Image (cartoon, grey):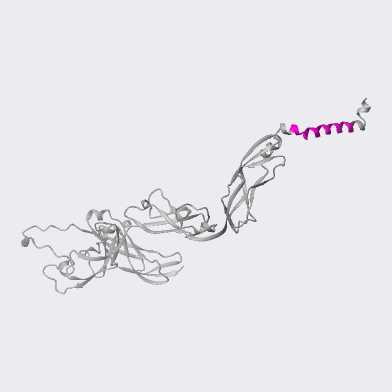
Amino acid sequence: MDKFIDSRWFLRGFALLMASIMFATVNNPGDQLNSSDTGKIENVPVEVIYDKELFVVSEIPPTIDVTIEGPPQIVASAKTLRNFRVFIDLSEEEIGTNEVEIQYEGLSTNLSVTLSTAVVNVKIDERVSEEFPVEIDYNNDIIPEGYEVDQINTNPETVLVTGAKEIVESIRHVRATLNLDGTVEDEETVDSPVRVLNEDLDKLEVSVEPSSVDVSISVVQPSKEVKLVPEPTGTIIQGFELKELSLTQTTVTIFGQPDEIANIDEIEVPFDLSSVEKSGSKISVPIPLPNGVNKLSQEMASAIVIFNEVEEAADDEESVAETGSVENEEDEENTGENASPDTEQEELELSSLPVEVRGTGDDLRVTFIGPPSGELDLRVTGEPDVLEELTESDVALYVDATDLTEGKHELDVQIEGPKNVTYILSQVDITIELTQT
């Protein structure tokens, strides 16, 4: 018996029997019918075959659903692996609207396949690109009260729009919106997406390069340039009369609401000459702030005082009003009233203050020619309580060397310091020499 089982003919016969059984099982029509199953595969991407360099297509659904029916094992495998594709072939279609079937491949022939969308009307158009300037949208609420827009621009100023020829031709606006949480503080820059719109302000489906731009906006207060008018005050030292009071800068820019500054054409600046002891002195005083003006381009005004010597002084000191100085008050005998005394003024001498040279680049070296030390003396006149608090650290002397080149330059000395006092420099200008480092 063992020899029979181990014989070659027995093994051949057994193998043939098993193969016959398996063949009958797989190919039995009744079993196939009884084991059929149905499955739905959702959101299958629709591929589109066309020349993307020349054409743009539209009206194509991005996904469809695929229903399959067949043997459970094959249905389950197709649903799990999704190793098939759904596509539309437009390689032979022409520009315009075309009715095209959606095709599929990669599914078993043992499956019955149903597509949720079998036919679509596809629009094919010529692909074009055009450059458009970017418009800027912003809400006026971002502009602070009393300010106006100084500059507003985008970087870059234009973008390249690519899409169907018919759509590109319908473009009316290419816009970037400036969105801020609050108001503009001097200058703001925001990265803003670009929107492409038609005449009805509908967003168009196109490609934009770049897709966003930097929008920059700056604001300023309304301004106006007005004249400065020097007004001499105080009593000139005995033996001299005022010949000239010459401003180093004759205008100033005022800032404020347009209706407030419209009627301001000049500002009178009082210069107290009581402390000026010699002709040629430079005196600096604060510029009064007119009503309705928020700020000035500069807070101080400077003038050069020129005296003429008077051979015979009059019994009474000449007043500024008569010779460019203020008129003295009448004697108590003539008025019958007590004259109100002037506000008490004191004088403070600040010696050897260094003069700062501003605006030179790192490639230039500064040498002081006159005075060689680069230092000046400064007399400050004002009320005692003000001068009591004043120190050398509160005052700065400087010259502006911006945009100057190599060589010698004579520059006016400017003063920075408290505004409620009068300054008199020992020297109105200095000479410097600029050389390459």
Which residue appears at 77% of the width and 34% of the height?
26
Please state the extent of the stretch shown in magenta in the rendering.
Answer: 11-31
* Depth order, front residue of 264/319: 264
- Asked if 10 appears above or below 133 in the picture, the reply is above
Image location (x, y in percent) of residue 126: 57, 59
- Residue 314 in picture, x, y percent from top left: 12, 70
What main secondary structure does the magenta stretch of the protein show? helix
What residue lies at 72% left-to-right and 42% top-to-bottom? 109
In the image, taking residue 149 as reference, residue 318 lies left or right, namely: left
Query: Measured from the top left, where is residue 122 in percent x and y?
Result: 58, 52
Work out whether 423 lies above or below 7: below
Residue lying farthest to the top in this orientation: 1
Quarter of the image with the N terminus in it: top right
Residue 307 quadrant: bottom left
- Residue 164 colored magenta? no
Q: Is residue 72 left or right of residue 202?
A: right
